[in-house]
Image (cartoon, grey):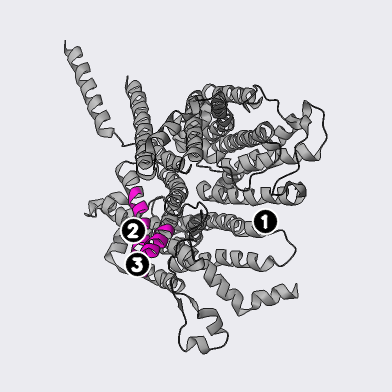
Amino acid sequence: MMNNLDKRFKLIRISVAISSALILALLIILLTSSNPFQTMYDFLIGPLTTARRMGNVIELMIPLLFTGVGVSIMFSAGQVNLSSEGAFFLGGVAAAYVAVSFLLPLGIHPLAAIAAGGAVGAIVGVIPALLYLKFNALPVVSSLMINYVCMFLGLYVINYLIIDPQAGYLASLEYPKSSLLPRLFPVTRIHFGLFIAILVLVLGYLFLMKSKWGYSIRMIGKNANFAKYSGIRVAYYILLSQLLGGAIAGMGGAIEQLGIYNRFQYQRLSGHGFDGILVAILAGYNPKLIPLATFFLAYIRTGADIMSRTSDVPIELIFIIQAVIIVFVAAERFLEGWKHKAIVKRSKEALVTEEV
Amino acid sequence: MENIIANILSPQFIYTILRVSTPLVFAGMAALVVRKSGIMCIAFEAMMLFSALGGVIGSAYTQNLYVGIVAGILSGILIAVIFAYFVLVLKSHPVLTGLALNILGSGGTVFAMFVLTGNKGTTSSLRSLRFPIVNIPIIEDIPLIGQIFSGHNILTYISLLTVLAVYILIYKTTLGLRIRSVGENPHAAESVGIKVVRTKVIALIIGGLIASFGGMYMSMGYLPFFTRDMVSGRGFIGIAAQNLGGGIPIYTLIAALFFGSADAISNVFQTLRIPAEFMQMLPYVVTIIGLMFVGTTNKDSKEKVKKIKEIKGESI
């Protein structure tokens, strides 16, 4: 019964967080736009107006599904490891390198590139955990530093090893046809990666919520000391979770490259890793809820993108929305008074029925 | 190679270290005060970005440096107060709140910049003011020393004075004693009548104040305008410096100068045929290596405490 109440309030808190963020966004639009109502329409309804735009929402969901699942596994172990951002970026670079440097047969080429992305992502993800376990270094700080290292390392690979001097801007050579993931629908750029994302989502759910490993990881996240005294190998599971989370984020980066782009053209970190953190927080680190959270984020992202192209409000509005959502969802005491009253009321009712 | 060594041994190089370390010193001191009060805050990045933009806008629209300073300080403190409200009142997860505020800092400043100037990259179209360069009389005429220590931006000197001020605040004042006691044992502090939340809020506001000078240095000293994400991890490096310095002001200063020299060296080495990316990576790599040492020193101090307790015959 208490559990139900907890769940209900978590849901209420998330809805209040999302709606207050959206209200704030609309207020900002009202204040800054010269044509606020058209801008609001573009932002809120825009993604539904054409098939291409609806396709954009799904395209955007694919990488976020990967980073969302990856971050959920990482954060479940109580490690605030933000290296999903670097893992996604460097995973994409690794895939680009494999795509343009090796000639492999049709089916194997993308698989090899994705595997390379996953392997690089795993290494990136596990470094902060190693530093934490071995040297007691704070994962938040070390992972952020690692993100910068990943960015410069990735740009080095693009700039010196696989650059296309004819491109006219900093970009890799074009990916050969054999390495690309097939597109699923005409007009949109929805690609085969969607199926892999769904597979990762299901496997991630089974791993994290239904397996012994996932149980141990979540136990460590809730109370590492308790987990230790119950005989769980804390260090092993922390490493495992960060390794897996990083690998999934890295795979996501690889799949994004081979599905959407025809050459590597990021000039800086892409932000997908940080978006994954938002997705994971919204979903409460439960992969079952990740599709919903991802859809929400992809939808407002697409809306903001349309808005920034058709109006005078910049896309950075989205960051303000994201920040507001995160702080409210993370605010444990938010609406606590209300919840407290509900608990008191319910226990009184229970008492009365008992007396009767 | 000889060229490089000559470069590193030159007074200009040490001058550069002081120049690039200034924001790190401010960030490190801000992190130190906040850490002493027992709060895990990573929002210095946002405080610095907001104050960097606030200072530029304030000074550009009024053409008055003091108004710019006030605007910059208020922008930085605003973030600190938001952080305090969510973490101390609504009990938000401090790291996630810091993360959210940093996202807000990065996106919010670009948003505000675009709305005000129509440009998403820099505010170079605004005629914002800069902090003055100070030539110290007498010292500026001494060879070598003059070249190193004179002719800096005034904020560089203020950053060094801040180290002293933070030392006095933390170790020589009642407020500092309260901040430390709240950080070390909030329950004990509460039992002797110290208002825990209020003390932590004050520590955060002081942190916001110091960080905002670091931010303003970026846009009104180091560069003459604001560019997007111009703080680029310096707030985090400040936290790392605080860690590496073991929470002691003078050691934190040394750590900040150390990270600053990694930055300065990367500038020197750019003349070599090493790819620029590796040079740009250097400060972050050095910070990671620095973090490794932090961990080991922390363990040492724990073991020391253990030993002291053993000697005193106390149970652990």
The residue labelled by disc 3 is B171
Q: Is residue A73 above or below residue B260?
A: above
Q: Secondary structure at mark 2?
A: helix
Residue at image point 40% right, 45% down? B94
Q: Is any part of residue B311 visible from this angle?
A: no
Q: To which chain does the residue with label 2 belong?
A: B
Which numbered disc, 3 or 1, marks the residue that appears first in the sequence? 3
Residue type indicated by callout 3: Tyr
The residue labelled by disc 2 is B74
Which numbered disc, 2 or 1, marks the residue that appears first in the sequence? 2
Res. B32 image quadrant: bottom left
Check chain identity for marks 3 and 1: say if they share one. Answer: yes
Q: Which residues are magenta?
A: B53-82
Q: Could you tell me how far apart the alpha carbons at marks 2 and 1 are, in whole angstroms? A: 36 Å
Locate residue A46, reporting x and y percent.
47, 29
Residue type indicated by callout 2: Leu
Residue at image point 56% right, 29% down? A56
Q: Residues within 10 Å of mark 2 (few under 14, many from 20)?
A: many
The residue labelled by disc 1 is B277
Check chain identity for marks 2 and 1: say if they share one. Answer: yes
Q: To which chain does the residue with label 1 belong?
A: B
The numbered disc on residue A2 is none
Q: Could you tell me how far apart the alpha carbons at marks 3 and 2 are, in whole angstroms? A: 26 Å
